[in-house]
Amino acid sequence: MRLSELLFTQGFGTRRVCAGLIEKGHVALADGLCTDPSAEVDLSAQPLAFSVQGQAWVYQPRAYVMLHKPAGYECSHRPGAWPSVYTLLPVPLRQRPTTGKVPGVQAVGRLDQDTTGLLLLSDDGAFIHRMNSPRHHVPKVYEVTTKHPLDERQIARLRAGVVLDDDPKPVAATAAEAVGDHHLRLTLTEGKYHQVKRMLAAVGNRVEGLHRSQVGRLVLPPELAPGEWRWLTEAEQAALAAKPAA
């Protein structure tokens, strides 16, 4: 792949901008500066590290990212009252070009602005569909802080299924466990609008705090602070691709 094209695929600007960065001596490969936009780069050399204007980067054919979403951010490219989660990502990730039918990096599902925790982002359409589709039954685990004390009746109803106002078919939690008097661990395989909040309201309680701790077999690492992001490892990608444990 030509060096200018490589930079373009990684989100460092238009093809013309990328060529200009190279010609001006702002791009370095492992063996030093390169000022030829047409220079061929061997993609089989992994990891393929380079730098643009002093910013270190590693070539990623597809973007698979985890973000510890803090409160007060919207999962939208066009947010309303709150800033976008995409502002927490570096500019190249935000500018990655359209891949297939996916217009750059997108959040895999959404978390409300007041919900924290594990958010996946990608430009791989098949991956996004697999993670989001109810047919694939990818479990999402939520740590719920409730206003009122939890009791066995509420837990039993959440497991059995409750009816929400937009669907006569009951919606059930895959798992529900009272970790404390006001701490519920809830596992869902669907992603309806405000689902956790509405399910808790249906059993006579109220959500005071909501945090997503796990998607599939991927657990939010304790060392990843709110607002921080990192690439998924190959092992983590494989864990997400694996079928949920029975």
Image (cartoon, rainbow, N blue to C red):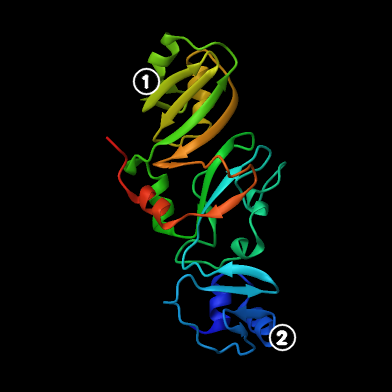
**Label 2, label 1: how far apart the Cα atoms are:** 61 Å
User: Which label is found at residue 159?
Assistant: 1
Instruction: Residue at 52% x, 35% y: name it.
Output: 212
Instruction: Residue at 65% x, 79% y: name it.
Output: 27
**Of helix, strand and loop, which one carries label 2?**
loop
User: Which label is found at residue 24?
Assistant: 2
Instruction: Residue at 70% x, 44% y: name it.
Output: 80
Q: Is residue 199 above or below residue 94?
A: above
Viewer-side label of 2, 1 = 2
Residue toward you, 238 or 139:
238
Residue toward you, 61 or 222:
222
Q: Give the image location of residue 235, x and y in percent.
A: 39, 53
Q: Is residue 191 above or below residue 91?
A: above
Q: Is residue 24 above or below residue 85?
A: below
Q: Earlier in the sequence, mark 2 or mark 1?
A: 2
Give the class, few, some or many, for how many residues have Cα within 10 Å of label 2's Cα (few <14, many ≥20): few
**Of helix, strand and loop, which one carries label 1?**
helix
